[in-house]
Image: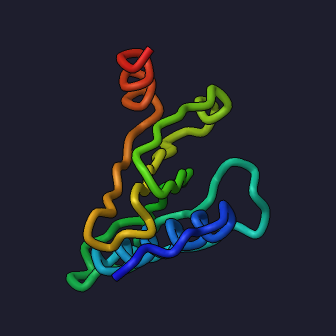
Amino acid sequence: MQNYQLDPQSVEIVGRNKLVNELLKAGIEVSLPIRDRGIDLIAYIDIDKENELQSFVACPIQMKAATERRFSLNKKYERFKNLLLTFVWHVNDPNSNIIYALTYSEALKVAEKLE
């Protein structure tokens, strides 16, 4: 199967859908913010099967999608508490796509090593 050339907007959509699918398969709910202020998705757990969850648990996610391996970090994301930075690579190749999720401090360490 030949990989279709995706435009940047399609790369973002395909990457977001891949990430959402993986979260849902893991039993995690997903919400899409109406406005984009640096948070692309909110992953949350509101109920559990055993009724042991004591409170609503949520995590903001900033997603970067690419058709290849691409890593970048913007200092503006440092201000978001508990933000997960996710990198969805090879979005147009289902046999090679992969998702990495890092905290800002973890991503900063990677960025420093890449300099």
- Vertical order, 115 against 74 (above or below): above
**Where is the C terminus found, in terms of image quarters?**
top left
Which residue reaches farthest left? Answer: 50
Tell me which residue sits at (41%, 55%) in the image. Answer: 89
Q: Can residue 34 be spotted in the picture?
A: yes
Counting from the top left corner in percent of width and height, residue 77 is at 61, 35
Q: Along the horizontal axis of the image, is 25 left or right of 45?
A: left
Q: Along the horizontal axis of the image, is 52 left or right of 109?
A: left
Numbered circles on residues, count: 0
Counting from the top left corner in percent of width and height, residue 88 is at 43, 57
Res. 99 image quadrant = bottom left
Counting from the top left corner in percent of width and height, residue 16 is at 53, 68
Counting from the top left corner in percent of width and height, residue 40 is at 62, 59
**Where is the N terminus found, in terms of image quarters?**
bottom left
Which residue reaches farthest front? Answer: 2
Identify the colour scheme used: rainbow
Tell me which residue sits at (60%, 39%) in the image. Answer: 80
Q: Nearer the viewer, residue 100 or 97?
A: 97
Q: Can residue 46 be spotted in the picture?
A: no
Res. 9 image quadrant = bottom right
Q: Nearer the viewer, residue 4 or 19?
A: 4
Tell me which residue sits at (40%, 60%) in the image. Answer: 90
Tell me which residue sits at (50%, 54%) in the image. Answer: 66
- Vertical order, 12 against 108 (above or below): below
- Vertical order, 114 against 94 (above or below): above
